[in-house]
Amino acid sequence: MDIETLIIGGGQAGLAMSEQLSLRGRPHLVLERHRIAERWRSERWDGLHANGPAWHDRLPGAAIEGVDPDGFASRAQMVAYFEAYAARIQAPVRCGVTVQSVRPRAGGGFDVVTSDGAFVAGNVVAATGPFQRPAIPAVIPADAGIMQLHSSAYRNPAQLPEGGVLVVGAGSSGTQIADELQRAGRRVWLCVGKHERPPRWYRGKDFCWWLGVLGLWNATTRGPESEHVTIAVSGAYGGQSIDFRRLAARGITLLGRSELYAEGVLRIAGDLADNIAYGDATYLALLDQADAYVAKAGLDLPEEASARVMGALPDCVTSPVRALDLAACGIAGIVWATGYRLDFGWIEADVFDGQGLPRHRRGVSDVPGLYFLGLSFLSRRASAFIFGVPADAAFLSDDIAARATAS
């Protein structure tokens, strides 16, 4: 079968790409190995809510039905939203098709082998997003006699055996899962690494709004100091700022980064206080930028001095745990909220660096006709987010249309 463009992936990036190609009248087909928005369906926990408000975390021209614009959509509402969006734009999606290999042809274009037969495509867009292969550090061996799972496999507290839970990773997933487990009556330990901690709201505006007006969504690169920094924010329980002091006051024991494991004891780094301080600094820095913007623009937004009040550091920060005996603490399960790695093993082309990252310019790879979409910082900070992917899809669609015109 010959097709001008194959889009691999039926999530937010694939749908955005389909819409932009349709607007330009370019023929294409979307291949999805499972179902539309599959990661929202089967790789997220039951109580997950979008981390941005509904007015923000959406694709162009379509509100999220049944959700207040300032509210946070549930996992089920986001699945329904993407299904409805695919129907509205009449996206040509073929579900249940796994792409096994993509190989450049000598004369241009690509041979694509799938579970549903072979294709010849003029262009291929890898729209599989940044959350591809769950990453679990090789710290605690699988035969250690304790249940371990990645956050992508966590569903709810009842899934874990009775007893305490160690959550490793304090980005959005780790903090929300730890919060949910503690609310369910579990004893929780939470490893906190270096993180940014934005306010959920400040002076009546969501932090997503502040990042927009301050131009921070358009940052084109990460600073070297934030290369491995996660963001701790939550849309759960109506939306909230992540406050590690408050989590500790409720009974969650904060820990530094996990390091070595031997004979049932997990060694903990002595970096907890520094990590909390770094998160506090990013929080206050955003408040400073917001205040400066309000003053310069002359906006009538209420002052919020209370937002700058920091409570005392909890005992678990001032007297940190450096060795955690899992059995003695009654820890029966570990949730690794440690992120993902890219996995493009199915693309048989010389477009990857030594770390497996694609070489590209705003998603346009070194191989003519091969594109990437939905990756972190593809063109700017917003690239991997629902609201940010359409701009990159438009850029790639323009390139595809120009290639078609030139051929």
Image: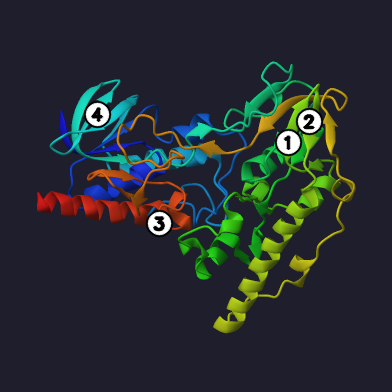
Mark closest to the chain's N terminus, 2 or 1: 1
Per the model, the C-alpha gap separating discs 1 and 3 is: 34 Å
- Tell me how the rendering is colored: rainbow
The spot of residue 98 in percent (x, y) is: 34, 25
Residue 205, quarter of picture:
bottom right
Mark closest to the chain's N terminus, 1 or 3: 1
In this figure, which residue is indicated by the disc labeled 2?
266
The reply to whether the C-beta atoms of the residues labelled 4 and 3 are less than 8 Å apart is no
Residue 309, quarter of picture:
bottom right
In this figure, which residue is indicated by the disc labeled 1?
259
Asked whether, in this view, residue 77 is left or right of residue 29, the answer is right
Per the model, the C-alpha gap separating discs 4 and 2 is: 46 Å
The 10 Å Cα crowd at callout 1, few under 14, some 14 to 19, many 20 or more, is some
Is residue 300 among what the camera can see? Answer: no
Mark 4 vs mark 2: give the one in front.
2
The reply to whether the C-beta atoms of the residues labelled 4 and 2 are less than 8 Å apart is no
Instruction: Tell me the number on the disc at residue 379.
Output: 3
The spot of residue 263 in percent (x, y) is: 81, 21
Residue at left offset 41%, top offset 46%: 374
Mark closest to the chain's N terminus, 2 or 3: 2
Mark closest to the chain's N terminus, 4 or 2: 4
Mark closest to the chain's N terminus, 4 or 1: 4
Asked whether, in this view, residue 155 is left or right of residue 20, the answer is right
The spot of residue 146 in percent (x, y) is: 73, 20
In this figure, which residue is indicated by the disc labeled 4?
112
Given the image, on which type of amino acid does mark 2 rest?
Answer: Leu
The 10 Å Cα crowd at callout 3, few under 14, some 14 to 19, many 20 or more, is many
Given the image, on which type of amino acid does mark 1 rest?
Answer: Glu
